[in-house]
Amino acid sequence: MSRVYNFSAGPAVLPEEVLKEAQSDLLDYKGCGMSVMEMSHRSRVFDDIIKEAEKDFRTLVGVPDNYKVLFLQGGGTLQFAQIPMNLMKNRAADYIITGNWAKKAYQEAKIYGDAQAIASSEDKNFTYIPDCSDLPVRPEADYVYICENNTIYGTEYHKLPNTKGKVLVADVSSNFLSRPIDVEKYGLFFGGIQKNVGPAGMVITVIREDLITDDPLPGTPTLMKYKTQADKGSLYNTPNCWAIYICGLVFKWLLGMGGLEEMDRRNRKKAALLYDYLDQSKLFKGTVRKEDRSLMNVPFVTGDKDLDAEFVAEAEKAGLVNIKGHRTVGGMRASIYNAMPYEGVAALVTFMEDFEKKHLK
Ligand SMILES: *Cc1c(COP(=O)(O)O)cnc(C)c1O
């Protein structure tokens, strides 16, 4: 067996310790003679798994008692619809467009009401985060929506927008659990877990209780009402049991290393290694404005398409895989999520230095 350094943007690398634990539990989870994939979601054993996962998540993130933590299906994408269905009381919401994911959420919200883009960085191919200190937030807006880390473009909000008192809704899929956050600044945040937390196919939504309504927009399916899942502890229907179990292991892994502050310290150290190299490289360039750089997704280019392709191919041979950039940016993108060890980033930087030497003669 040999593991590569996997820089995939998602589904992405998981901690090796977690994979090994899942492996050792696979045939017989804690003496019950079956795997977590095979047991009833109504069983005592699974009830312990989901309750423990929620408890550990709350400890890790510091979720106050007046927020619900929901384990939902449909990924990040279904939240693009579920949010307006449940939160758009006035049928108005303001969106900040910082990339494809924010744009998709905005377009989806238009199905349900008057969604408006109140700021955008599309003029420069989403290479920066717009100034959000004095936005034209509308009085009737039910919420202000952001995508906090832009997986494709490699930008991240390092300061939350001034929503002028409106509820802040955030997609945190690709910086989920990468650093401490102040939950009370958000009305709702959600993360598709396959970027930085677990396997694909689930989203964790954290929502303030007063936003959970009995009367979402007419026509909202039962399963799409946050109230349905909040009342049933995310067990209204059969949940993604396996993903919940893996998330639980990842939460314990994070708690064991010292929680989100320690994770933040490690992530900053990893990102600094790569960005410091990029800043002095004569071959490679980062593609986004410095102060808006993501600590999770690092896009870079040589400026020569053929050379980019050669780099991606050579890197793969060296065990540094999934480093090709998204088609809308081109070049390369290294996703350096929580589970990417420092050694992986160091190996990448060493490889880039060698490649640079070879090609800058
Ligand atoms: C990947 C991603 C999504 C979509 O997630 P799915 O689980 O595929 O629906 C949404 N938002 C962001 C920021 C993402 O990176």
Image (spheres, helix red, strand yellow):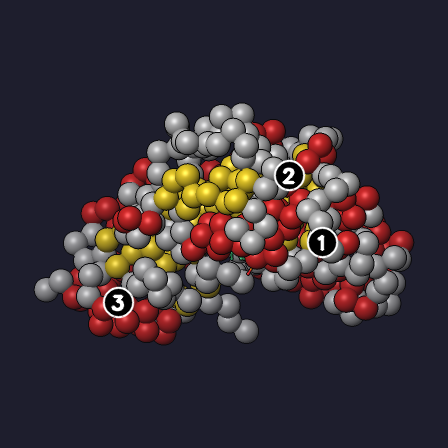
Determine the image quadrant of residue 199: bottom right
User: Which quarter of the figure is the C terminus placed in?
Assistant: bottom left
Residue 312 horizontal/vertical position (percent):
32, 69
- Where disc 3 sits, the SS reads helix
Marks 1 and 3 sit apart, C-alpha to C-alpha, by 48 Å
Neighbour tally class for label 3: few under 14, some 14-19, many 20 plus, Cα within 10 Å = many
- Circle 3 is placed at which residue position? 308
Q: Residue at x 49, y 26 (%)?
A: 164
Sequence-first disc among 2 and 1: 2
Q: List the residue tagged with mark 1.
A: 219
Residue drawn at x 77%, y 41% is 214
Q: Residue furthest left?
A: 361
Quick check: 224 left or right of 109? right
Q: Residue furthest top?
A: 165
Amino acid at dot 1: Gly
Q: Amino acid at mark 3?
A: Asp
Place of residue 264 in the rendered image (x, y in percent of width and height, measured from the top left):
49, 39
For the point 26% across and 72% down, the residue is 310
In the image, what residue occupies the spot 23% across and 68% down? 305
* Mark 1 or mark 3: whose residue is earlier in sequence: 1
Left or right of 299 in this view: 227: right
In three-dimensional space, the C-alpha distance between marks 3 and 2, rounded to whole angstroms, equals 48 Å
Q: Position of residue 283 (x, y in %)?
A: 19, 58
Q: Gap between marks 2 and 1, in whole Å?
A: 14 Å
In depth, the one of 54 and 222 nearer the eye is: 222
Whichever of callouts 3 and 2 sits on the residue coming sooner in the sequence is 2
Quarter of the rendering occupied by the N terminus? bottom right
Q: Which residue is mark 2?
A: 89
Disc 1 crowd rating (10 Å Cα; few below 14, some 14-19, many 20+) is few
Q: Is residue 77 above or below residue 252?
A: below
